Image (spheres, rainbow, N blue to C red):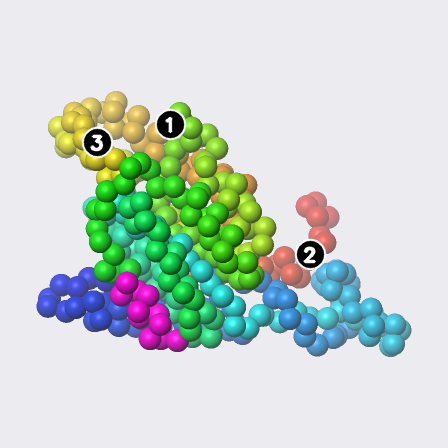
Amino acid sequence: MERPLGTGGGHGPEHALRRLELTVVRRLDGLLQGQHQGLLPGPGSEPGDSRMYVPGEDDVRRMDWAVTARTQVPHVRDLIADRELETWVLADLSPSMDFGTADMEKRDLVIATVGAIGFLSSRIGDRFGAYVVHGDQVSHMAARTGRPAMYALLSALLDTPRGLPATGPTRLGEVIQTLAAARRRRGLRVVVSDFLELGPGGEPDAVRTWERPMRRLAARHQVLAVEVLDPRELELPDVGLITLTDPETGHTRQLHLTPKIRRDYAEAAARQREANRVALRRCGVAHLVLRTDRDWVYDIAQFTLRHRRTAHLAGRHPTRRAGT
């Protein structure tokens, strides 16, 4: 298990960032290298060369009518990946992220995820910027290119104060709406959060307040939602009497963890996570789950390779229907 942000043993933040970059380059870049292929592969939008149309494999919407009329043979025009895109990430560093019972805190996993996406983007020349949620504040970091800019952004994330008081739950939908309104140029948008918000009335299955802004964001950009989890958010240990504190509101409560309470908690947590999955699917965004007790680098690589295979198959058979 990689712990790229650990700063123990007398090493400072710069050493942690260098180790994070080494982890990304050594384990991710080798797996994901290719012709400008990022975490969410797509056909791109820049016109490429024309070639003969292959029935059953090529999308007729890419038909090159000018060449077809001139040669009297059907041709399609390939699309190549865009260059110098803008990638913007929304990093949730609200108080609920200052928690972790496994190999790292959720906060560290958020920063590691931002670093992985940022280092991969910078190696192909994309500009990379961030919006950071902490407490009731939202910080904006301009999109820039290059390794020094990436180090500066990650250093700012590492220096973000912990445990800033908030007046209530993180208003993730408002920040997503701000990102969509401020950054109109098409590109990749990444939202890294624990998505712990419940629906109105505290119902885990209710519509989330971030759904509509997320749907609008996905209508214009490629969007990746990264859900960060800790195992204790899914089930409680059999330890008897414990004190629970809500980091967002500061409310504290003592509970005796009977088998029934633990079972009800696990069921409610499963419902909440399933509701998140369904909501993100409704929004039309890619959904990646990372856990503090798993190898996050492996999970990112497997997610990306799986999406590349799906994109490849969809590109080969764009008009094929189920059962045909």
In this rendering, would 215 be left or right of 88? right
- Alpha-carbon span between mark 2 and mark 3: 52 Å
Q: Secondary structure at mark 2?
A: loop
Residue 192, position as x, y percentages in the image: 38, 52
To which residue does mark 1 refer?
A: 202
Stretch in magenta: 146-156
Q: Earlier in the sequence, mark 2 or mark 3?
A: 3
Q: Residue at x 21, y 46 (%)?
A: 163
Q: Nearer the viewer, mark 1 or mark 3?
A: 3
Residue 8 location (% of width, % of height): 13, 63
Residue in front for this viewpoint, 296 or 12: 12
Q: Which class describes the residues within 10 Å of circle 3: few (<14), some (14-19), or many (20+)?
A: few
Residue at (44, 56) in percent of width and height: 190
Badge 3 amino acid: His
Is 316 in front, or is 150?
150
Q: Nearer the viewer, residue 121 or 236?
A: 121
Q: What amino acid type should be assigned to the residue bearing mark 1?
A: Gly
Would you place residue 45 above or below residue 211 in this image? Answer: below
Task: Report how far apart the C-alphas of labels 1 and 3 lie in the structure.
Answer: 16 Å
Tell which circle, 1 or 3, labels the residue nearer the N-terminal end. Answer: 1
**Residue located beneath label 3 in the image:** 251
Residue mark closest to the camera, 2 vs 3 = 3
Residue mark closest to the camera, 1 vs 2: 1
